[in-house]
Amino acid sequence: MTKEIPNYGKTFALLRAGCEVQWEEYIEHDFVKSLGNGTLPQASFLHYMVQDYVYLVHYARAWALGVVKAESIEEMRLCAATVDSLINKEFSLHIQTCAAQGIEESSLYTATEELETIAYTRYVLDAGLQGDFLDLLLALAPCAFGYGEIGLRLKDNVYSGHPYEKWIKTYSGDDFQNVCIKVGKLLDLAIASRVGDTPQNSPRWHKMQARFTKAAELEANFWGMGLRAGKQ
Ligand SMILES: Cc1ncc(C[n+]2csc(CCO)c2C)c(N)n1
């Protein structure tokens, strides 16, 4: 298993190092470990997938808020493209997985939200409503980077007939890894143009790190919701 830290840019490296404990609780969660070795109960996975669909709906709304809060045409374009790709492409893993279990997309959209889903998605949206483009981006970023790192760690675990092969291949694949690299570049540029080349020396850094760390904690909490479902 590769434990190398992926290169998603300079800011990712700084932020990740600034919350190592919370980051490990996110990417090395028992949900992730059991998904990786194929022992995760199917009920847990399905419950997580339904909630994750709801999560993605709000996540797309948050990227749409990025269009509103952007301060350059490049930032606007990247946010608009992400909204398009989330709404029109990224749901396919969830739709297919749930359809195979007899759950239709219309019922995914109206699924009752778990508290963990509400907490995480509304935290991200509020970061953008209350703050500026950077606040929003820092709350959005752990979602992409964490899944990218998890995908790379789990990809060698896949064996023939692995129950979660599709999930692992989605997040370890080139398409998704390129999304992480693109988000990393957007974050580096957005930070450099607002707080300079040594953001860790900015008076804003503490709050910036706190945004990122909180989103990582909310990711770990989201996995916990999935595990709990399998035990009910
Ligand atoms: C709770 C939760 N966190 C992260 C992801 C991963 N993810 C969601 S959208 C997207 C594309 C990035 O713009 C990625 C990587 C997820 N599915 N669910």
Image (tube, grey):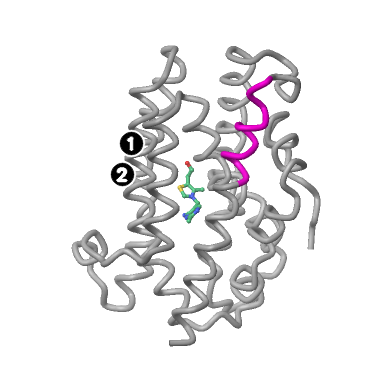
**160 relative to 140, above or below:** below
Q: Position of residue 115 (x, y in %)?
A: 38, 64
Residue ID at (58%, 14%): 194
User: Which amino acid, mark 2?
Assistant: Asn
Q: Label 1 neighbourhood size at 10 Å, few (<14), some (14-19), many (20+)?
A: some
Name the quadrant of the C terminus.
Answer: bottom left
**Residue span colored magenta:** 203-213
Question: Mark 2 vs ligand 1: CB under 8 Å?
Answer: no
Calculate the distance from the C-alpha at mark 2 to the C-alpha at mark 1: 6 Å
Name which quarter of the figure residue 15 lies in: top right
| Dominant secondary-structure state across the stretch colored magenta | helix
Of 173 and 232, the residue lying toward us:
232
Q: Position of residue 161 (x, y in %)?
A: 57, 79
Residue carrying label 1: 84
Q: Is residue 210 magenta?
A: yes
Q: Is residue 226 left or right of residue 213?
A: left
Q: Is residue 90 left or right of residue 175?
A: left
Q: Is residue 15 left or right of residue 131?
A: right
Q: Is residue 101 magenta?
A: no
User: Which amino acid, mark 1?
Assistant: Asp
Q: Residue furthest bottom?
A: 232
Residue carrying label 2: 88
**39 relative to 184, above or below:** below
Name the element at disc 2.
Answer: helix
Name which quarter of the figure residue 34 lies in: bottom right
Name which quarter of the figure residue 76 lies in: top left
Q: Position of residue 150 (x, y in %)?
A: 65, 57
